[in-house]
Image: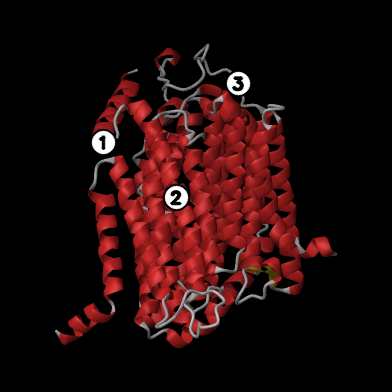
Amino acid sequence: MTDIIHIIQTKYYYLVVIFLMMIGLYTTISSRNLIKKIIGINIFQISVFLFYIAMAKVKHGTAPILWDKAVVYDNPIPHVLILTAIVVSVSTTAVALALIINIHKEYGTIEEDRIMEKQKLDLDRSNAA
Amino acid sequence: MKFIQELPVLIIVIPLIFAVIVPLVGRLNRLLPWIIASTITFFCFLISISLLMTVLDTGKISYRLGGWEPPWGIEYAIDYLNAFVLVVVSFIAFIVSLYSRRSVELEIIEDKKSAFYSIYMLFITGLMGIVITGDIFNIYVFLEISSLAGYALIAMGRKREALVASYNYLILGTIAATFILIGIGYIYMATGTLNIADLQERLPALFHSKMVLVALAFFTVGLSLKLALFPLHTWLPGAYMHAPSVVSCIMAATATKVGVYAMLRIIFGVFKIEFDIHFIPIANILVVVSSMAIIAGSALAIAQTNLKRMLAYSSIGQIGYIVLGAVLANQTAMTGSIIHILNHALMKGALFMVAGCIVYKTGIEDISGLRGMGKKMPFTMAVFTIAGLSMMGVPLTVGFVSKWYIAIGALNAGMWYLIPVIITGSLLAAVYIWRIIANIYFPEELPEHELQYTDGGTEIPSHKSQYSEAPWSMLGPAIALAVLCIYFGISATAPLSIAEKAAVMLLQ
């Protein structure tokens, strides 16, 4: 028990990461709405970004800039990696939203169940033709 | 001399730059995007050949991006394995872009054509980037470049299902990429480096750490999703089926192969083989999973009525072979696995090209519509037959060589019970391929006017099986791949020797 309390006290940021990660993954998997799925994916990705940022923190470290009083710096590499990953995440979201707009144009809905119903109708129609 | 040294970066930068230029010049001339795409991919093919030659002569090439030394800067590290995969990817990219002209004319709307070629080159850039880079975070970045381009390419399909297929792939692909990102985070935390060669040195000391175990778990799941290993394959059939023919051709022939390459590189290159076997039985787990993939993929392929969907399921089975050969972790099986990357690219490329030719000429996508097609499109069907026989693993075709090596490797590993799996996979392939070949050449008696044609682009003026072959610009590349299927089936020494060296390198 004391172990767990100790972990919560000292490593709470990783718990936040895990919490967000699970929210994101659960939303992505369980939600039937295409936009909500993307929101879930975004939360999931952001949790990973926070994981990187948390690991980059050095105790008593300052921002990684040239500064006279700085003794210890935070590790800047994860920050830079995450900048790249944020760009990737934004472009993924953009592509996904573009797809959703087109899906909405074609199907008139962004609910997965309705889309699947319509796909089934399409299939029946092409089989009947 | 200077130019030669810069080749590793040029193979990435040139298609990347032209991907931006293509949509600009696409307005000037309708053919220009296609010409540029073909020239550039051909140029990449030449570069990759020259890189392979250099690697064979002098060993590993290390290119420092921006002149920064490896552990700090990004390194492009080329050895036997990625030089080989690079040649495969760039060759398929070239031959598919030759093939693409007429097919794209039919299947992609006019004002999106230059955008198509632009995204096509981005896709190729991403794939070649994954292969060439020696930096693990760079693998993630290029993976996302190729995946994002892939989503857009799939969404260009003619039917509205393509959008949904692309969306499903996007969700799963993003989850996979994020898993890989978490894995990278863990090994960065453990070692403080992202360079693959550096990781190889530092990781063995940390093999007892749970962090490294978790990293491997995330990598395995993420990469399995990307390469569509059996239980995680659900995005693949829909994506291949609804994508434009050219896109399913290039994706089936290269994208999953590059996923396999990334898996080989990370599971055997970054983590050593002792780790995969002694610390966590990941290799054994993957043996079971890939055996399931072989059986299930091939069995599901039999149940399909749509030609492209059937080929997609067959891809899932063939990916099972590649992964199975790799995780047996001995030299023979690994050689078989690496050479199957080439072989499967050749035969799946040819088969999807045939599917594209059929769609171009008749609009037929269903297997039942192929009845009597042997008279109508003899060359196309000959290509289908050769590639199909190769898929079954008939001797004198490429499929035989790799399956033979994987089977021998399974025996060497003392896993004789995998032989029935390998043979069953081949037999199931024989069932789904033969079903079509029989239908093509020996149609059951049925009055011609009763034939059913599914919807498709072109109207068929007469339903009689007259000679009406696909245009040569599409047929030529398909025939070239079929000829290579036979050529490398008879004389496999050149690729085998490279694959053997790559296998030795991975397993040391």
3 vs 2, front mark: 2
Q: Same chain for labels 1 and 3? Say yes or no.
A: no
Query: Horizontal and vertical percent for residue B470?
Result: 61, 27
Quadrant housing residue B111: top right
Report how far apart the C-alphas of labels 2 and 1 lie in the structure: 23 Å
| Residue reaching furthest to the left | A1
Residue at the spot of label 1:
A111
Report how far apart the C-alphas of labels 1 and 3 lie in the structure: 44 Å
Density class for disc 1 (Cα within 10 Å; few <14, some 14-19, many ≥20) is: some
In-image side of B43 versus B443 (left or right)? right
| Residue reaching furthest to the right | B1
* Scheme of colours in the image: secondary structure
In-image side of A51 versus B155 (left or right)? left
Quadrant housing residue B375: top right
Report how far apart the C-alphas of labels 3 and 2 lie in the structure: 48 Å
Residue at the spot of label 3:
B468
Q: Helix or strand or loop: what does disc 3 sit on?
A: loop
